[in-house]
Image: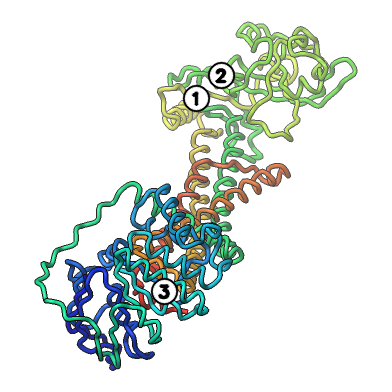
Amino acid sequence: MITLRNICKNIGQNEILKNVSLSIQRGEFVAIIGQSGSGKTSLLNIIGTLDEPSSGSYIFDKYEVTKLDKDEKAKLRRENIGFIFQRYNLLSLLTARENVSLPAVYAGKKTDFRNERAKNLLSDLDLESKINSKPNELSGGQQQRVSIARALMNGGDLILADEPTGALDSKSGIMVLNILKSLNKEGHTIVLVTHDQSIAAQAKRIIEIKDGEILKDSSTAYEKQEIKIEKMKAEVKTFTLLKNQLFECFKIAFSSILAHKLRSILTMLGIIIGIASVVCVVALGKGSQEQILASISRLGTNTIEVRPGKGFGDIRSGRTWLNVSDLKTLRTLPQLEAVEARVNSSAIVTYKNISLNARGEGVGINEIKIKGLELEAGRVLSSDDIKNNSNVVVIDYNGHQGLFADMNAKNILGKTIIFDSKPFVVIGVLKRDANSRAEDVTVRLYIPYTTMMNKITGDRLLSSIITKVADNTSPTVAEQAITRILEIKRGQKDFFTVNSDAIRQTIDENTRTMTILITSIAAIALIVGGVGVMNIMLVSVSERTREIGIRMAIGARREDILMQFLIEAIMICSIGAFLGVILSISLVYFLNYLGVFSMIISSLSLFVALLSSVFIGLVFGFFPARNAANLNPISALSKE
C-alpha cells in the first residue's frame, strides 16, 4: 500500500527526516513511536499527503505521490485516507452528523446517502443520541469518536491517527484504541503515531524513529515487488458534486455571517450606502426629468410655439404682437399639421354664488389635441364656434372642482357661467391633466380665440401661435421653415420660437450627464465598500486558516475552498445590496410622501445595483479566496 524510498524533509537548515525508507502492507496495524521532535508526525503528514518531502519517492498503491498536483492529492485523501487528530479538528459550526458527512460532500455523494451513512457510523460508535450535537456539546471522547466516524465516511482504507488518545482520559483512550483494533480486523490499514510505549504495544508492528531516522522496525521483511506506476484518472465532475459544493458553500457562508453579525454588518455598510446612493440618485434624476418633461409637455407634444419679442423676458415684446395674418401665413406650411392662435386674458368667473379667479385661453379647434388633454364629457371647440364667435367654453378639471364640485361632468354641460361679465355655455369638461402638478389650482377656460379677441380683449393681436409638427417632418426643419416665412412676411425677426422637442433633448442630455456624474460618485462608495469586503475576507481567511486545513485534510479541492470564500464575499455584498435597495426604496417613498423631491425608482437601476454587488463580491473576494485555496494543508492545520 505504501512505499517510501529515501524520504528527506528539511525546514530551513533543520533536517526533520533523513533518508527514511519503509513499506506498509495493506491491512497492517503500524505504530510509529518516538519522542517529541523525532520526526514521527512529519512522517505521518507525508504519508497522509498533507505535507511534501524535500526529496525521495513516495508511492501510494499505484500512484507516485510526489508527482501529483494538489487536487490529485486531495482526491487521494478524499477516497482512501481518513485522519484522526489528537485535537479532533471538528468544525465548530457543524453538528456531529454534518462533520461526519463532510468528506462525502466533497466526494459528490447524494444527500440521502450521506445522512444515512453518517447516522449509521455514529450509531456504531454509540453516538446515536448525539447526531445533532455540535462539538462544544460533546466530551473529548465523543469528539474523537466523531472524528473516527468522519475518517470512515468515504471508506478509510488507510486511517492515520496522530496521538489519538493524547487529549483523552484513560477510559476514553482505551475505547478509542479498541475501536482502532476493531477497524484493523475489518481490513482497514492503521498507522498510529504515539510517544507512549503501552499504546504502541497495541499495534502489530512498531517502528521507532529518532532524530529523523528509523531506529528500529519490528516487521518481518517483505519480499520486494515491482510496482507499476499509473497516472491518476481525471476526476469526472457530476451535477450532484456541483450541487453539493454550492450548497455547502452557501451554508458555511451563511453560518459564518451569522456567527460574526457585527463584523458582517459593518462590512456591508459600504455596500449598503453605495447601492442606496446609486438607486436614489437615479430615482432623483428620473423624477426630476419626468417633472421637467411634464412641464414641457404642457406646451404640447412635438410642438413649436411662436412668441413675440426676442426671447423670454423681452420688455419690448408688447410692441411686436403677432396677428391673425401671421396665423394664416403659417397655415400654408406643409411641415405643420396644425396651427392655432392663443389669446390670453385673466378675469373673474362666476357660477351662481361662486366666484373664482380664472385664466381665459382663447384657442383654436386643435388646442385640446395639441396639449394632449382628454374630455371627461361633452365636446371640444368646433370650426363653427371659431367662425361664429360663439360664447361657448370648455372648462378644465380645476374649473369643474371649483365651480361645480358636487355635480357630475355630464350634468355640467349646458350650464352658463359668467367670465369677464360675458355669459358662456359649457360645452365640454376636461379630465385632470396627468402632467400637471398637484399644487396647480389655476382655473382654465378654453374659449374660441375669435370670441376672446372680439368680445373680451377687443383687438386683433395674438399672445402666441402654437403649431404641431407633421409626423413625417423633423422638428428642426419645421422650426427653420417657420422662422424663414415669418421673417419674410414681417420684414424682421421680432419673434422667437420655443421648440418642445429641442428642450426635451437638451434636458435629456443634461439629466443624463448629471446622472452619470453623481452615479460615478456613488460608485466610489461601492468601490470603498468592496475594499472593505476584501479586507474583512482577508481577516476571515486568517481567522479560519485551521478550518481550511481541516477541509483540505478530508479531501476538499482548491476550487472548493476558493468557491467557499468567494460565495461568502458575494453573499455579504448581495445582502448589503438587498438592504441598500430596501433603504433606497424606503427613502424614495418617504421623500415623495413629504413632497421634498419627485423621485421615480427605475427597475433597471435596481437590477444594475444588485448585479454590481455580485460583481464587487467576485472582484474583491477573489484575492482572499485564492489565498485561502493556495494554503498548504499542514501549515493551515498547525495554525492556532
431 over 412 or under it: above or below: below
Task: State the image coordinates of residue 478 (x, y, percent, origin top left).
Answer: 45, 27
Name the kind of residue labelled 1 in the image: Lys
Q: Which residue is mark 1?
A: 489
Mark 2 or 3, closer to the camera: 3
N-term-proximal mark, 2 vs 1: 2
Q: Which residue is mark 2?
A: 325
Alpha-carbon distance for marks 2 and 1? Answer: 9 Å
Residue under the image location 34 percent in, 89 percent down = 34
Along the line of sight, the residue nearer the viewer: 384 or 569 = 569
Q: Are marks 2 and 1 in contact (CB under 8 Å)?
A: yes
Circle 3: element type? helix
Which residue is painted at 28% across and 93% down in the image? Answer: 13
* Residue 177: image tag: 3
Among numbered discs 2 and 3, the one appearing first in the sequence = 3
Q: Residues within 10 Å of mark 3 (few under 14, many from 20)?
A: some
Question: Which percent across, then down, holds residue 240?
Answer: 35, 48
